[in-house]
Amino acid sequence: MTIRLYDTAAREKRVFEPQDPTRVTMYVCGPTVYNYAHIGNARPPIVFDVLRRLLMATYGEEAVVYARNITDIEDKIIQASLESGEPIEAITQKFAAIYNADTAALNVLAPSIEPWATAHVGDMIEMIGKLVRKGYAYVGSEGVWFSVKSMADYGKLSGRKLEDNEAGARVTVDADKRDPADFALWKFAKAGEPDDAIWDSPWGRGRPGWHIECSAMAAKHLGKTIDIHGGGIDLQFPHHENEIAQSECAHGQQMARYWMHNGFLDMGGEKMSKSLGNVVLVHDLLERWHGEVLRFAMLSGHYRAPLDWTEDLLKQAKTTLDRIYGALRRVWEAEGGTAADRGVRRALEDDLNTPVALAELSRLASDANLAADRKDAEAMASARANLVAAGKLLGLLTLSPKQWEQGGDDDGNARIDALVQARIDARAAKDWAEADRIRDALAAEGIEIMDGSSGSTWRRI
């Protein structure tokens, strides 16, 4: 039962050993809530939800403390408020609710703690003050800046050297900075900015920089050193690098013992971007596909590798889930079995190897079909238990087979149930023409009737 995780900082897989097995802490950077999340934004919550489920299975559900923040103050949010005329709080409350609903539809468990940045400005100010007093930060005319040269090992997470950030290369020259790589801890308010984006501070009215938000919230809720910090690979630099700088210089101790990053999502071989016009929203996808289909597709690739997101990938995920749910249906009534198969768990313990885990899930479905073919009651009960337990680890198979196959609203399902029963009655009366008419009418709606020894059932196709 050894878990090995790839630690970005160490650049290798390491055996996971929490500081305290009774309180395993994980922080994952959450959304900036000013718009709908695109499907690339869904990869971190799904990936780290699987890790959370594995940790809960290992250490106990109550032992794992998972924090995912809400960034509700940031330049893009201010711009959205200025353009729309809506108060910042109205924008952030709306899109935070949409984000949480969309991730819930992907079977992502709600975080143990969901800190909002605006509720922690006091903690951020306190942390900035500590950095100023220790000589790691300075006050300029535009705000308070972190001095990267004051930290001897700045860049250790990403491996980037300060000379990589020479003026004119990757960082825009700013006359208010001592070094072009210095970053904002506190931004002074500018003319025209809304009042609900401005706070008082010892250095002047303004708002916190983005990086200090996560440092302060992680320390507040999980402690100065946490077990795991996760997020997308795009956050490795500068966001996570700067979190390390702020946190370790302020507290004098390691910020996170393991750093984990998921790879990008590509759209047909290209990186998703607004400029390419290939941004796909989670909200829109959920209107066409069940959340489990999106989740299965996301887990089909290893989390650290790029994943090519295509329509074919979604179709394949749907087909595979239909087959697995079909196998589960055949053993669904078998009770009393004990989950004993560890194939899925072993795969996840090896740095969340979800492609292998999904292959193991398919193997369990095959086992269920074989047990049903043999009408082996004990084997059927074990197969059901194994499938359900494996599904729980992966965040899949959360519905009954009937719910999966029939889907839709209750009223619509009741209507179809009535038509299927009418077909059964027609067959009993040897009214084959009427039975065929009902079957064909349902087929035109995408409903398949399945006749078996135990009666007739139906599913959406």
Image (spheres, rainbow, N blue to C red):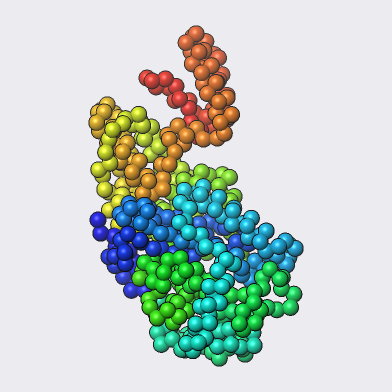
Image coordinates for residue 446, horizontal then vertical, percent: 54, 32
Displayed quadrant of residue 411: top right
Displayed quadrant of residue 350: bottom left
Image coordinates for residue 339, horizontal then vertical, percent: 28, 41
Image coordinates for residue 440, horizontal then vertical, percent: 55, 23
Farthest-out residue, top:
429
Residue 227 seen anywhere in this rendered image of the structure: yes
Residue at 61%, 82% in the rendered image = 202
Count of numbered circles on the image: 0
Q: Is residue 337 left or right of residue 125?
A: left
Q: Is residue 331 left or right of residue 236?
A: left
Residue at 46%, 65% in the rendered image = 221
Above or below, 57 against 424 in this view is below
- For the N terminus, the quadrant is bottom left
Above or below, 5 against 322 in this view is below
Q: Is residue 152 left or right of residue 139?
A: left
**Camera-side residue of 216 and 160:** 216
Residue 263 seen anywhere in this rendered image of the structure: no
Image coordinates for residue 31, horizontal then vertical, percent: 55, 62
Q: Is residue 414 left or right of residue 382?
A: right
Residue at 25%, 33% in the rendered image = 379
Above or below, 229 against 153 in this view is above
Displayed quadrant of residue 180: bottom right
Above or below, 273 against 414 in this view is below
